[in-house]
Image (cartoon, rainbow, N blue to C red):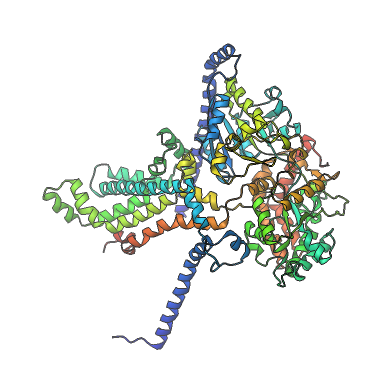
Amino acid sequence: MHFRTRGELVVDRLNVALLFVIAALMIFPFFYMLVVSFTSYREYMNTDLLLWPKTWVLDSYRYIFSSKQFMQSIGNTVWITVIGTVIDLAMTSTMAYGLSRQVPGRKYINFMVLLTFLFSGGMIPTYLVVKATGLIDTSWALILPGAISAFNLLIMRQFFMGIPNELTEAAIIDGASEMKVYTHIILPLSKPVLAAFGLFCAVGHWNTFFDAILYLNNPDKWTIQVILRQIVVLSDTASSLKPTLMAQQVRDQHLPPPETIGMAAILVATVPILFVYPFLQKHFAKGVMLGAVKG
Amino acid sequence: MNKNWIRVQAAACVAFVMLFSAACSSKNNDNGGASSTDGSTNVSAKTADTAADPLAKKLKITAFEGLWGKVLPSDSPGVKAIDEKFNIDYKPEFVPMDQAQQKIAVLMASGSQPDILGLEGVDSNFIKWAKQGAFLPLNDYIDKYPQLQQIPKSIWDSVSVDGKIYGIPQYFHVKYMNSAVIRKDWLDKLGLPMPSNYDELLQVSKAFTEKDPDGNGKADTYGFSTSKGIDWNNRMGVYYDIGAWYHKNEQGQLIPGIISDDANLDRLKFMQDAYAAGTVPKDWPVMEYTDARQVFWSGKAGIYYEGIPGTGSMWNLLSENAPDAEVVPIPPFKAPDGSQGQPGMSGYYTMKTLSSKLANDPDKIDRILTMVNQFMTFTPFDQRNPQNENYDWKQGGVDKGYTYANGVADLSGDNDAKVAARPSTFFTVQEWAPSDEALELDKGLKNPKEAAYAKAVIEEWNKPNYVYIDPFSSIHSDVFNEKMGALYDKVMDGETKIILGQEPLSYFDTIKADFLKNGGQAIIDDVNKQIEAVGATGTWK
């Protein structure tokens, strides 16, 4: 048994204190948003730094929840996130499993996947593909084109290859089909990697912003991030000289709603995705790359 | 090293592929235009049959544009009203303004150009596309539509490329640019005269900070407010304006105010002293523009800047916090060269272009320009009421799109349903006023403080020889568009250092030299060349 020396104890305590400070720094912006979102606009404008409102008001939340566009965009985003994540995982894991087995042409397909690392199509060719496949103005345009990420695919393939071949072989000898091996052996053993990528994908879909603007023509289908930006975005003044003079005046007449509403909107849009983290925490802790390293 | 080389090659390949695809798509456009020639004879034949009623044929018209305001769904009542009135199937699309440029670039490159494309202004993309033949030249159409004839030639010139008019500019007043305002009630209370130069401005700022002008017994007021990027630069007239092309260098070339000693040194000295004396919030270099604005409108600073029409909610805030507040414009300072006035603006903001694919579809061109003509018709202030048919229709009908009480139409934008009922929300052509005064911007303002202020501003701007018409407004310079943004930010960083006292005033020479070396001289050369070519000169109006 090793008894800690005085010095080590001091360092330990300092460590804990420091971590508390860092944690507080991380939590403070959220706390501030929460406080401001419950403050009246007048009080907010008249106070330099708000730490606790004098009166708590629900106006901002009333405004947000009564806004049809806001609620609709949350609905759209939830839909895209759930369906998108399921499709991402299904597509990526089936392809990764296939590539982890001895299928003919595997090398060629691997090469094709790797190629996309070097040559990305770019915005315009991708737009052309989406247009040609008739996905413009549908939520599928936000899900299908990016369903398989080459990076995720390769890591997942590596993870599957790390599962002892004997398991698969034994199952096949016992008469299991490839599909059965995939669903009954590979997937249950791959929960950490699925959870980790599931989280990545979900966050990615939740944050969909530019794709929504690019592919969706009807604002009814926009995602929460687009609406959020319209609510909170502040005009960026000095970007260029000449247009600014007039843009500034036009902008001043179309000011975003007050900051209190902005804060409430950010909270409402951020909290749902934050709640996903704790549930995936235990898998996530095991690490994404864990599967890629032979234990 | 090897990896980097692969990346470079990859990037080059991608660039090549993109260029190639762009080239292909513009070729497709041409083909599309050519192949529809056959159809055009039919179209014109049909037009002849139905000449009696130009709206007889139902047409589909697509439009795309960036918006500063909220984007509403295009199946709103406002769109249906447009469809009915003009017998069209109107498909407008809007995206937030700061994202519009990117989407427009994608639409253009992928051959999805809409019939009507709205652009924020003349930029290098506009000129490039115009030269590639993407837009319809409008020269031959203008005479047919009375409202279009109202637009002055100088503004048509600024949306033309090689003599061809490619855009329909949208009205924006030349006068009333945002400029300095001051709390007159504070001046009176402290017995101070209106400042007429930077020394006096400094004295006033100090008094506003130290002498408790709001009389609450606390030292909680500032002389003035500003934000990062030095949001309005405390410019006090054209001479001190960093954006105007007013001053000349030793070679006789016009230069932008941003690097002129005349425009900057007095102003920077003032801001340096004012900062040292604590008359501006200490954290301004990291403050957002909205926070700086809040300092003034919540009644804690005496000097800021504002234009008309202002923002109603800000005036209400000031009225609540400081019921005695009286805000008036600070007249521009009399400059060493004898001038005393404000810079004018270019007279338009945003424009509409028509797709060149429409060239063989005279019906559609006529329909679109008829709509433009209708929306552009100016309604004088005293006719903005339900009895004026055109106005009432454009704003969605009384009690549906707007409310009308005490002789004033209320067009506020806080009710989505009302905004969605207005055709003017979805066909964003501005009314073209015969003059800036005809707008009567001081009328119909709900807040009495704002109304009084607007009246004072209009009076101020109506002084003779007050508005400087910048020759820069008549030209467009690719070099300027490409390089100015980054250079501007750098100059502002340098000026911030001077104001904070980290660098002496003489550091401005370094800023200036950097500016000229890193592309500033190229901008000046190009702008001067263009100005000479069109023969524009700076004039006072």
Q: Is residue B264 above or below residue A1?
A: above
For the point 87% across and 54% down, the residue is: B336
Q: How many marks?
A: 0
Q: Quadrant of the C terminus of chain A?
A: bottom left
A8, above or below B414, in the image = below
Q: Is residue B517 positioned above or below B275 on the image? A: above
The residue positioned 33% from the left and 64% from the top of the image is: A285
Q: Position of residue B98 (x, y in %)?
A: 57, 46
Specify whether A76 is left or right of B477.
left
Comparing B38 with B328, the one in front is B328
**Residue that lies at the very extreme toward the right in this rendered image:** B338
User: Where's the N terminus of chain A, which quadrant?
Assistant: bottom left
Residue B318 percent across, percent down from the top left: 68, 58
Coordinates of residue B4 in the picture (x, y in percent): 47, 52
Closest to the observer: B392 or B182?
B392
The picture quadrant where one finds residue A144 is: top left
Residue B9 seen in the current view: no
**Lateral position of residue B69 relative to residue B349, left or right:** left
Work out which residue is located at the far front of the displayed protein and give it: B406
Nearer to the camera, B104 or A111 = B104
Q: Nearer the viewer, residue A242 or B395?
A: B395
Where residue B380 sits in the image (x, y, percent)?
A: 73, 35
The answer to whether B91 appears left or right of B332 in the picture is left
Q: Residue at x 55, y 30 (%)?
A: B81
Q: Quadrant of residue B221?
A: bottom right
**Which image quadrant is residue A282 in?**
bottom left
Residue furthest left as drawn: A174
